[in-house]
Image (tube, rainbow, N blue to C red):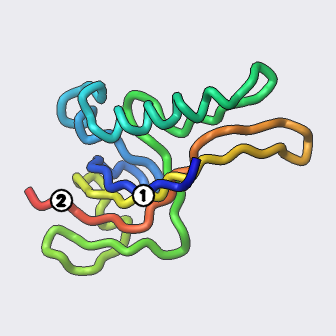
Amino acid sequence: MRPKKITARARLKQPNYANFLKYYHDGSAKDDPFYKYITKLADSHKLLATEDQTFKKNFDEEGFYFKIKDYVKCKNSSGRPCLLEDLLDHDVSISLKITPYNFTTDDGKHLIGLSLQATHVNAIRN
């Protein structure tokens, strides 16, 4: 599986964690487009794991964790550049690079999962 780029709408709760937007506003992520997408993607990648392998899941029904590089491009609701921390507790549009991984650690544990990396975070205008 190749890396995928997607833009998701979410509620930024921490610099590396966001609630699915439908979960935050409606109490359920079942109808959230990104939740459906990431669940389907994870399920297809999880099929590669055997019983002795660990599938690492970085999301649940409430939200998802993501990685950030040293610098993430961010814009506030007026379109001006800002810091990621300025967008906490705001509805945002997050551009994510989703990369599947499948490797063995130094201690012999086999890990399979999805890596989510934010490249842009923009406030959603209300």
Judged left or right of residue 101, residue 18 is left
Q: Position of residue 2 (x, y in %)?
A: 56, 53
Of the 4 image quadrants, the one containing the C terminus is bottom left
From the viewer's perspective, tell me whether residue 61 is left or right of residue 3: left
The residue to which callout 2 is attached is 124
Judged left or right of residue 79, residue 89 is: right
In the displayed orientation, state which residue is furthest to the bottom. 80
Gap between marks 2 and 1 measured at Cα: 19 Å
The residue closer to the viewer here, 91 or 7, is 7
Say which residue appears at 37% left-offset and 67% top-offset. 120
Q: Residues within 10 Å of mark 1 (few under 14, many from 20)?
A: some
**Residue 86 coordinates in the image, percent (x, y):** 31, 67
Kind of residue at badge 1:
Lys
Q: Which residue lies furthest to the front in this view?
A: 1
The correct choice, above or below, for 50 with respect to 117 in the image is above
Q: Residues within 10 Å of mark 2 (few under 14, many from 20)?
A: some
Name the residue rendered at 35%, 32% in the picture: 36
Query: Which is nearer the N-term, disc 2 or disc 1?
Result: 1
Total numbered labels placed on residues in the image? 2
Which of the 4 quarters of the picture holds residue 72? Answer: bottom left
User: Which residue is at a point 57% across and 44% down the rendered structure image?
Assistant: 114
| 71 or 50, nearer to the observer | 50
- Residue at the spot 18% in from the left edge and 29% down from the top edge: 26
- Residue type at tag 2: Ile
| Residue wearing tag 1 | 5
User: Which residue is farthest top?
Assistant: 51
Q: Say if 64 sits above or below 82 in the image.
A: above
Residue lying furthest right in this view? Answer: 107
Horizontally, residue 109 falls left or right of residue 57, namely: right
